[in-house]
Image (cartoon, grey):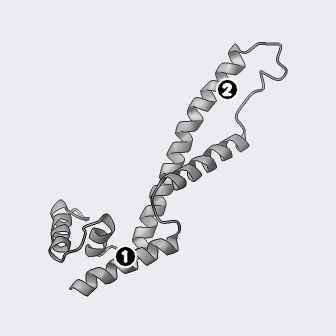
Amino acid sequence: MARTGVYKWDVKEARDRLVKEGKHPSIDAVRAALGVTRARLVRQLLTESVLLSAMGALLGLLPAWAAVRLIATAGPRELPRLASLSLDARAVAVAVLSHRLLLRAGSNARTSADDLVRHVDATVADVTDQV
């Protein structure tokens, strides 16, 4: 079965074509030159964002869970309800939402899907105007 997808030389050709046309070969411009549709690009970016959020939340929850276990076992027995100490759904929700907000605030990505679509439209229009 033949491999489907984009090869390195396809990307290099699209980049070289953009440079020859006087365009800056940004990631979005190369994607547009390769024929990536807006819907696919938005789906790809949203999938990446969700996966990064989930991985970040998981990486934050693992040390939190270990710390809670350590405090529950090594803490002073005089503290009430120390044995019942655990992470609940609220703690998980806070971890996921805070990581999602930090990821969004720290990135220089578009603020909404509409902005992304407008950017892709402008890139596609620039590329097609040069052809």
Residue drawn at x 19%, y 75% is: 22
Q: Which of the two residues, 75 or 21, is positioned nearer the viewer here?
A: 21
Q: In the figure, is residue 130 to the left or right of 92?
A: left
| Residues marked 1 and 2 touching at CB (< 8 Å) | no
Image quadrant where one finds the N terminus:
bottom left
Q: Which of the two residues, 122 or 96, is positioned nearer the viewer here?
A: 122
Residue drawn at x 76%, y 13% is: 76
* SS at badge 1: loop
Q: CA distance from mark 1 to mark 2?
A: 46 Å
Residue drawn at x 63%, y 25% is: 67
Badge count: 2
Q: In the figure, is residue 123 to the left or right of 58?
A: left
Residue to which mark 2 is pinned: 68
Task: Kindly indicate the quadrant of the structure image that contains residue 83.
Answer: top right
Image quadrant where one finds the C terminus:
bottom left
Residue 24 in the image, given as x and y percentages of width and height: 25, 69
The answer to whether 76 is drawn above or below residue 131 in the figure is above
Residue drawn at x 45%, y 61% is: 109
Residue 123 in the image, given as x and y percentages of width and height: 34, 77
Task: Kindly indicate the quadrant of the structure image that contains residue 121.
Answer: bottom left
* SS at badge 2: helix
Residue 105 in the image, given as x and y percentages of width and height: 54, 54
Tell me if mark 1 has few (under 14), some (14-19) or many (20+) residues whose alpha carbon lies within 10 angstroms of its own: some
Tell me which label, 1 or 2, sits earlier in the chain: 1
- Looking at the picture, which amino acid does disc 2 mark? Val
- Looking at the picture, which amino acid does disc 1 mark? Thr
Tell me if mark 2 has few (under 14), some (14-19) or many (20+) residues whose alpha carbon lies within 10 angstroms of its own: some
Residue to which mark 1 is pinned: 37
Q: Which of the two residues, 21 or 113, is positioned nearer the viewer here?
A: 21
Residue 52 in the image, given as x and y percentages of width and height: 48, 50
Residue 93, numbered circle: none
